[in-house]
Image (cartoon, grey):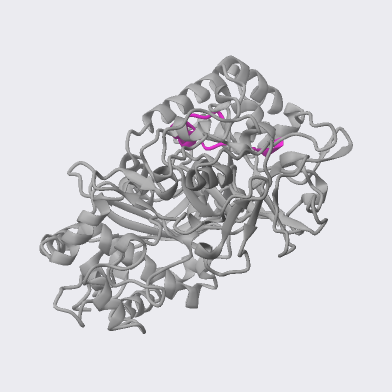
């Protein structure tokens, strides 16, 4: 769709909420679906791709994350206007009209129709029969493989009437669209004068007695047609998944698959540090030009030219070989390994351009802090890369490989190793690590409680939380503490709740035990943030904030409902929270790593219950 249908979207939203395959509404009320990555960097004037030199201005690099996701580079979503060879080109993120079925707004007509122009139509549409304005249908169908389509009106009608109505010869209409109940909305064929069929129950879905997902549509013998309209009108494949009906603005229509990484600086010495500092001072296009060169000999030639022969070819070759070896050494098989590499720098400290960490003397804090917390570090600078590599529909899942997710973003599957959309931001944070002996001693007792055992069993039933492997009392405690601390920090740091994020470092494996969390902000500009978190993380200031957060855990304004509901069956999505609700623990979705699940403030302070909280003696 062209300039008439533009809608302003932040680049960060294209990574989370409105990425490829997601829908949003433009200023004229038209629902659009964001197209695949194949056409993201094309000029609106010529429909041709931008020059490589222009595209490189938008490239980012994070070698660790690139290796993890199997791509050559990352790209920041393009600006709406891009200067190329002295000419200003409009480079919008492409989108198409979806759903295609429209309903006449005239209550006496209510005819269903599809625009002649198809998904590229930008005009306000009018009914062919009565010329009244027509608006997009709110009903769609989707499946767990990510396919999405208009609601199967003819299939639904034919199943109930045993007829053979079709789009090429029949005219459908709706009745009862003014009702607030779906069961009162009915569809009928005017051409064949069929009876009106209710839409009652179309949203119902769930596992059958054999544990296999089924829906009202599948019971009606309606199958998924494998449609991927964001990749083109002809994009479809065979699909055996169960189709599920939904409203187009429902929250289960789109769950972006994102990953993030804290940039780990190059580790070297002597002249190689000098070369790396010179490299880091280059512009992003220059860095992308060097990183995308491929062979080391070509990289040496390009970098040597940019630096005007400041270093010998031998030194540059050694630098690139050392850099590649460092990336290979950082290769990870699990998320725990990946995060343990970051944790190493939080514990040991570092002072580089992209990451500056200052460990604190734990004995400098009040006497009660070292009893529970073994390490506190002030992260003065950090660089966070966030990228999107796919999406889910109906519910988040982990049963696909990274490559399978990436194929959902491209019409041409051979491009999946080229690039992914990403944003890179700079900020600050506080890293806190719990005392291993004390938290493990507490964990042994808490693991025996009925409420924890029930929560652990529920977690195993939902695959979208498999990223965090087995649920442990340590994880439940640290995650809950993270939410409490963020909710308290907003009063002292100057940041809003949505500006703060968590990153959890929890593992019980013998060779990689870690019980830490990072609270950080990555909402600043290229120079970082204002230092609010680092300032209040210092001895003499952080203690009062932690103490207040612990105190807040003892009581919720929704108690006793919050506590009793949580510890007698669970609450929240899929019952995956215990004593945790919007009045005490929940955060904005972008701030939490675990979908606001697996929370219980009784792990922190359980003075109102029969349980034992970790901080009960504070």
- Identify which residue is drawn at 59% across, 48% down: 22
Horizontal and vertical percent position of residue 358: 42, 57
Q: Is residue 269 visible?
A: no
Horizontal and vertical percent position of residue 155: 53, 42
Tell me: 381 left or right of 41.
left
Q: Is residue 542 above or below residue 128?
A: below
- Identify which residue is drawn at 80% across, 59% down: 132
Tell me: 122 left or right of 22.
right
Q: Report the front residue among 43 and 168.
A: 168
- Identify which residue is drawn at 42% across, 37% down: 241
- Identify which residue is drawn at 68% across, 36% down: 168
Horizontal and vertical percent position of residue 209: 24, 47
Which image quarter holds the C terminus?
A: bottom left
Q: Which residues are magenta?
A: 57-72
Q: Is residue 71 magenta?
A: yes
The residue most toward the right is 86
Which image quarter holds the N terminus?
A: top right
């Amino acid at each position: 769709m062209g300039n008439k249908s533009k809608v302003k979207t932040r680049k960060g939203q294209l990574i989370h909420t409105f990425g490829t395959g997601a829908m949003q509404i433009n200023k004229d009320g038209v629902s659009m679906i964001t197209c695949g990555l194949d056409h993201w960097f094309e000029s609106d004037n010529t429909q041709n791709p931008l020059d490589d030199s222009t595209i490189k201005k938008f490239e980012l690099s994070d070698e660790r994350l690139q290796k993890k996701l199997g791509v050559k580079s990352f790209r920041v979503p393009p600006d709406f206007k891009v200067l190329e060879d002295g000419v200003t080109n409009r480079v919008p993120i492409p989108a198409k009209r979806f759903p295609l079925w429209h309903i006449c707004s005239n209550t006496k007509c209510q005819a269903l129709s599809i625009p002649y122009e198809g998904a590229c139509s930008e005009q306000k549409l009018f009914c062919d029969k009565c010329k009244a304005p027509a608006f997009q249908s709110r009903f769609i169908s989707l499946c767990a493989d990510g396919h999405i389509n208009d609601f199967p009106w003819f299939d639904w009608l034919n199943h109930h009437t045993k007829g053979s109505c079709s789009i090429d010869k029949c005219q459908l209409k709706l009745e009862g669209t003014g009702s607030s109940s779906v069961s009162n909305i009915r569809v009928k064929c005017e051409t064949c004068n069929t009876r009106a069929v209710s839409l009652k129950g179309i949203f119902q879905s769930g596992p059958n007695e054999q544990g296999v997902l089924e829906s009202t549509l599948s019971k009606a013998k309606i199958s998924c047609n494998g449609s991927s309209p964001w990749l083109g009108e002809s994009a479809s494949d065979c699909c055996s998944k169960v189709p599920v009906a939904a409203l187009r603005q429902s929250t289960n229509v789109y769950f972006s698959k994102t990953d993030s990484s804290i940039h780990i600086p190059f580790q070297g010495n002597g002249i190689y540090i000098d070369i790396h500092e010179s490299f880091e001072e280059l512009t992003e296009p220059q860095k992308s030009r060097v990183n995308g060169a491929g062979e080391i000999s070509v990289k040496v030639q390009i970098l040597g030219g940019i630096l005007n022969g400041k270093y010998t070819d031998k030194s540059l070759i050694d630098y690139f070989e050392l850099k590649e070896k460092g990336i290979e050494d950082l290769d990870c098989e699990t998320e725990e390994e990946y995060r343990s590499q970051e944790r190493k720098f939080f514990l040991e400290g570092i002072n580089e351009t992209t990451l500056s960490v200052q460990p604190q003397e734990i004995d400098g804090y009040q006497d009660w802090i070292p009893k529970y917390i073994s390490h506190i570090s002030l992260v003065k600078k950090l660089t966070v890369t966030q990228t999107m590599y796919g999406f889910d529909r109906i519910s988040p899942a982990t049963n696909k490989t990274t490559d399978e997710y990436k194929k959902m973003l491209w019409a041409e599957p051979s491009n999946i190793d080229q690039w992914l959309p990403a944003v890179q931001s700079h900020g600050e944070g506080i890293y806190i690590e719990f005392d291993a002996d004390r938290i493990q001693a507490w964990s042994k007792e808490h693991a025996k409680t009925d409420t924890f055992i029930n929560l652990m069993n529920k977690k195993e039933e939902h695959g979208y939380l498999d990223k965090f492997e087995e649920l442990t009392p340590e994880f439940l405690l640290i995650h809950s503490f993270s939410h409490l601390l963020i909710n308290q920090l907003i009063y002292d740091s100057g940041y809003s709740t949505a500006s703060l994020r968590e990153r959890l470092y929890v593992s019980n494996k013998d060779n990689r035990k870690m019980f830490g969390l990072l609270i950080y902000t990555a909402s600043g500009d290229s120079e970082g943030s204002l230092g609010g978190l680092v300032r209040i993380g210092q001895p003499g200031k952080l203690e009062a904030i932690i103490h207040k957060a612990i105190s807040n855990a003892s009581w919720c304004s929704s108690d006793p409902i919050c506590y009793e509901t949580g510890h007698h069956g669970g609450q929240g999505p899929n019952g995956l929270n215990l004593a945790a609700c919007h009045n005490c623990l929940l955060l904005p979705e972008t701030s939490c790593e675990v979908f606001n699940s697996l929370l219980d403030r009784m792990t922190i302070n359980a003075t109102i219950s029969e349980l034992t909280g970790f901080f009960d003696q504070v």
